[in-house]
Image: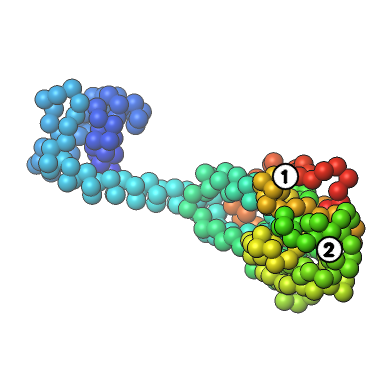
Amino acid sequence: MTFDQLCAFHAVATRGTFAAAAKALHKSQPAITKLVQNLESELDVVLFDRAAYRATLTDAGRRFLERAAQVVADTESLTTYGRALGRGAEPQVRLVIEAITPLRPVLAALSRVRAAFPLVRLELRTERLAGTVETLTNGSADLVIANAEALERRKMQAMHFARVRIVPVVRRDHPLAQAGSPAPLAALREHPQVVLTDSARVEPAPPINVVEGGLRWTVTDVTAKLQIIEAGLGWGGLPEHVVRAGIRKGTLAALSVHQFETEVIELVTLRHKERAQGPVARALWDELGARPGRTSRSAEAPGTKRG
């Protein structure tokens, strides 16, 4: 029994006719017929009932297909893996992204890389502020998407990825939503500002868009921050792509906060200049730069300051 015989049998069984199997395998129909006949002869079993136009599996053929399909799939997977090894593909790529990163363009890039390297493992995780770049400097990431302000440019190669607008928001019925525009500093200080903490272990970055002298609630991810704000327990700045739907539905209100100094955050893809990378990491770098993100349009009225 040969792998070609198994492939021919599997193709006929799954496509219904010898002609369709021949087309799928780029062989002549007589060649497919001969392969299946030889397989039946070697096994001394009839796998197909050929009385009808379509090749119908016998009971023995159906049972044999269960095992044969797995062998064909495993062999094709092993072939793909071997070819990847031949290209020097690394077994795993580690991508770390800033918590405010829009995922859609990241997933599009990962999809294209997976098509070329289907067996490579991916480790994708989020960090915050300086903690994102720290994973690259300490060697726990191969590529990162980080705030451009957090760079150590002497050792990093940077490539623009996206610009993310930060919109200060509050639940529609929160007192701050009726406090006026711009929101008075005293009112902002009176209510909890929900803030993402820096995940850096060594050297945290200075806080961004934090009102001095106010009450702070700290969280470690964007989802928790959004849910706290949606519950009416505080206010804070979030990526526009995260709050756009809530503003449109009227469940969230955008605030004008003059104390916010950063309206748009530039995100960049980074890799370490002094570390060699395998073909998968290089391919992911290229794909992340192939279709850079764009600054999203404002979900607020013109002239409203974001943070």
Pick the residue in front: 285 or 184. 184
Please rate how many residues cluster around mark 1, counting C-alpha atoms within 10 Å: few if below 14, some from 14 to 19, many from 20: some
> Can residue 158 be seen at all in this image of the molecule?
no
- Residue drawn at (16%, 41%) of the image: 61
Q: Secondary structure at mark 1?
A: loop
- Residue drawn at (72%, 55%) of the image: 172
Q: Which mark is residue 293?
A: 1
> Can residue 255 be seen at all in this image of the molecule?
yes
- Residue drawn at (34%, 47%) of the image: 73
Q: Secondary structure at mark 2?
A: loop
Pick the residue in front: 210 or 192. 192
> Could you tell me the amino acid type at mark 1?
Gly
- Residue drawn at (68%, 52%) of the image: 251
Pick the residue in front: 225 or 221. 225
> Taking 226 as reference, is 262 left or right?
right
Q: Quadrant of the N terminus?
A: top left
Q: Position of residue 147 (x, y in %)?
A: 78, 59
> Could you tell me the amino acid type at mark 2?
Asn
Q: Is residue 262 above or below residue 233?
A: above
Q: Position of residue 243 (x, y in %)?
A: 70, 52
Q: Which mark is residue 209?
A: 2
Residue situated furthest bottom in the rendering: 202
Q: How far apart are labels 1 and 2 at the CA level?
A: 23 Å
Q: Mark 2 or mark 1, which is nearer the start of the sequence?
A: 2
Q: Is residue 239 above or below residue 303?
A: below
Q: Nearer the viewer, mark 1 or mark 2?
A: 2
Q: Position of residue 169 (x, y in %)?
A: 76, 56
> Taking 245 as reference, is 60 left or right?
left
